[in-house]
Image (spheres, helix red, strand yellow):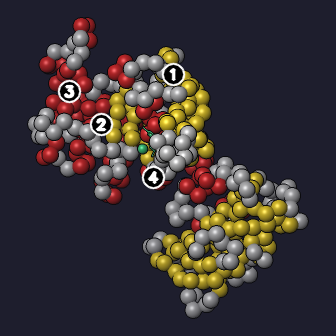
Amino acid sequence: MKVVLQNLTKTYPNRNKKAPGQVVAVNDFTMEIPDGKLIGLLGPSGCGKSTTLNLLSGLQKPTSGKIFFGEDDVTDLPPENRGVGLVFQNYALYPHLTVKQNITFPLENRKGADKLTKQQMLEKATAAAKLVQIEELMDRKPNELSGGQQQRVAIARALVKMPRILLLDEPLSNLDARLRLQTREELRRIQRETGITTIFVTHDQEEAMSISDLIVVMNAGVIQQIGEPQQVYDNPSNLFVAKFLGTPPINVFSGTIQNGMLYIGRDAVLPCKGLADQPVTVGIRPEGFQLCEDGPLCCSLKGVEVMGRDISVVSTHTACQSQTIRSIIRAENAVDTSLTTVRFSLNPKKVFLFHGETGNRLQFAQE
Ligand code: ADP
Ligand code: MG
């Protein structure tokens, strides 16, 4: 089912007596979510992700704007009539019910023509349990399950009604690292198998990048960029997005454009055509540095960290905005750690320029 969010805004009264006014949790959010896709809604804590999800589920009403599921305007529909499945970070299972009873719970209160027999409910619950691979746990209580198993029960419960839309709010945050990795792949598989349009909220960029068809990067209630994960990584539209995606994070420098040349400090690092002389913020991805004896960017070498396939060269530069520069180099390149300086040439595809004040991306040509 296609989902359209049209100029959605949600404001809350601000309870801070010293700074009265409104908190704009979601600010003029407009997007069309294609049918059958998995969307990763991504941003730092407090940026409005949960509020956006709650507007979709109907748990909260927008201050203004509209929501459509397919052609249906659902803006004023209560949650139970929207056909959404919800999964939260804390599982929210009923502790006194078995797994089976937890999963069938959303089917119990159906009335009239929708009413199901016990047998039908069991069949649906078994199908949902199979999908998340917990059939053998049906008679246990939640406290007899691991965190990962509990979250699977919560997902099965959300799927049992065959919802039109599946909404997941940080569903993996309570799981340990290994289980988080495994469960996110499971989620991807379940989404593919069911074809249910899914919106997945996370603050973890790697998680969103790895399983989403499209990511939506949010900051302070405002959409920053929408696109396929790789495309957003390769083409961030502003400094916020560039900094939010990627581990290790992008390296940020203060730079200047002078006569078609980009300078970082006194180093003339790249020809940049088509830009007027101005101060700029320069972002360089860790993989954009190449060791090069006569490379233009001259840094102070602080150390080398071995990461197996790659090594991470840690260095400093007076124009760098963070304490250290991290560059990722293939392990077969030996770095002489007795030296105090290291020189790099830069891959122009991995160098992004941003307006010094607005942080908006500035396009440049090499030639
Ligand atoms: P996220 O899920 O991205 O961490 P939220 O959507 O929960 O962010 O919150 C967005 C903003 O709205 C935050 O500044 C938060 O403090 C504020 N907020 C959320 N819920 C309420 C509420 N019920 N009353 C007042 N402010 C709220
Ligand atoms: Mg949240």
Q: Identify the residue position indicated by label 1 in the image.
A: 68
Position of 49 relative to 84 (above/below) = below
Q: Earlier in the sequence, mark 1 or mark 4?
A: 1
Q: Earlier in the sequence, mark 3 or mark 1?
A: 1
Residue ID for mark 3: 104
Question: Disc 2 marks which amino acid?
Answer: Ile
Type of residue at label 3? Thr
Mark 3 vs mark 2, CA separation in Å: 12 Å
Helix, strand or loop at label 3? It is: helix
Q: Which residue is mark 2?
A: 155
The CB of the residue at mark 3 lies under 8 Å from ligand 2: no
In this rendering, position of residue 204 left or right of residue 315? left
Q: Are marks 1 and 4 in contact (CB under 8 Å)?
A: no
Classify the position of the C terminus by image quarter.
Answer: bottom right
Residue 61 placement (x, y as % from top left): 46, 26
Task: Residue 333: name its quadrant.
Answer: bottom right
